[in-house]
Amino acid sequence: MIFVVSIMLLFPGLASAAPRLHGIVLAVTPKTGEAIVRHDAFGSMPAMTMPFRIVPRERAAQLQPGATIDADVDVRTEPWTLRNVSSTSAQSLTTDPSPLRRVTPLKIGDVVPDTPFLDQTGKPFRFSDLHGKNVVLSFIYTRCQDARMCPLISAKFRQIQEQTGARPVHLVEVTLDPAYDRPPVLGRYGRVFGADPKRWSLVVGDAEPTLNFAAQFGITAFPDPTIGIIHAENTVIVGPDGRIRKMMSDTAWLPAEILAEIDAENGVASNPLQRLNLWLSSQAVALCGNSVAGFSGLADLAAVLIIFGALAYLVYRLARKIFVEST
């Protein structure tokens, strides 16, 4: 895996080769030409459910939930694009598909929507109340059983809470299961991870506004009867002015890297190596997808350089031996 990542980081043009995807369409939005597909493993990507853009857009209108498709995947776009899509007739799904939500995606520099929520103590919560503080935002649900997903994010939030010191930082986790994760449930979940309500809010609102809020950050919560809620693992850094400063789509970040990024954004001296490490991890996921979400930035890059150095030395020795023997 390290070798694959290193090739793509050092030679990004190689990432343009289109792998072939096989999967089942779960939901379609013909207006935007997007679809949610539960796909088998392909390339370096494990089997998962995620949104794709369909090209040409008219092809999306021809797809029905339950259809089995095969397509070429273009990983250079966001979201990834499916081309040369072929499909079979639609079959009934084990659960009703959740449509892609028609919301305006947020980008760097946008103000976080002031959606009304309740926190784990039952008190009203709005992001406008946090102006003047740096905010680290992520999305979880309390019934998540995958230790690599929501529990991992919450465990990292606990470390940020412990390492924040005197920084004006507030942590926020928005649930993707608003029907179940009401304030008492969020309170119990927060206590498991040691969440201090004064510095770490777990919030929920009415179902539609909560899920629309998440969708604006690129989070589509799709219920799966065998896995639970399938969703992206986005983490967002919000500045004291309430505007988005950084968005990460993986779980590879470390608490110290987040705090270093916040310090740098606020003009405070910070560790440049930690910020570089965070950037390298994000670039690895952007190139290769979440299958390399464990890429550890500088550590793996150092290993890659050692491997390449060793290979280069072996090639040099072999070439020299061949040249000497030929002369």
Image (tube, rainbow, N blue to C red):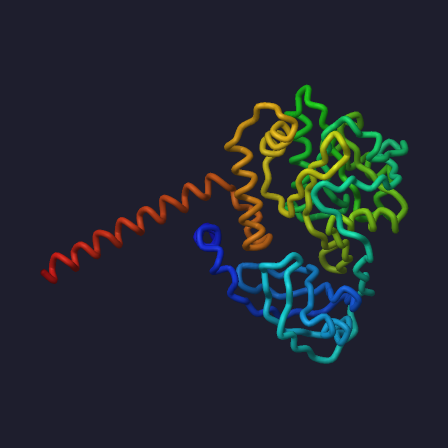
The one of 76 and 220 positioned closer to us in this rendering: 76
- Name, please, the residue furthest toward the front: 109
- Judge left or right: residue 235 versus residue 277: right
185 vs 219, left or right, is right
Residue 252 location in percent, x, y?
Answer: 58, 43
Dividing the image into 4 quarters, which one contains the C terminus?
Answer: bottom left
Residue 239 appears left or right of 210: left
Q: Number of marks in the image?
A: 0
x, y percent for residue 72: 59, 70
Q: Residue furthest left?
A: 327
Looking at this view, is 177 or 136 the one in front?
136
Residue visible at 62% across and 25% down in the picture: 267
Quarter holding residue 261 = top right
Residue for point 64% across, 25% down:
163
**Residue 194 in sight from this viewpoint:** no
Where on the picture, by quarter, is residue 185?
top right
Q: Is residue 130 above or below residue 285?
A: above
Would you place residue 323 above or below residue 248 in this image?
below
Residue depicted at 41% across the width and 43% down the height: 303
Is any atom of residue 189 visible in this view? Answer: yes
> Residue 188, position in %: x, y?
80, 35
Q: Would residue 27 be found to the left or right of residue 284 on screen? A: right
**Residue sticking out furthest to the bottom:** 89
- Residue plotted at (74% across, 67% down): 33
Q: Position of residue 166 (x, y in %)?
A: 68, 19
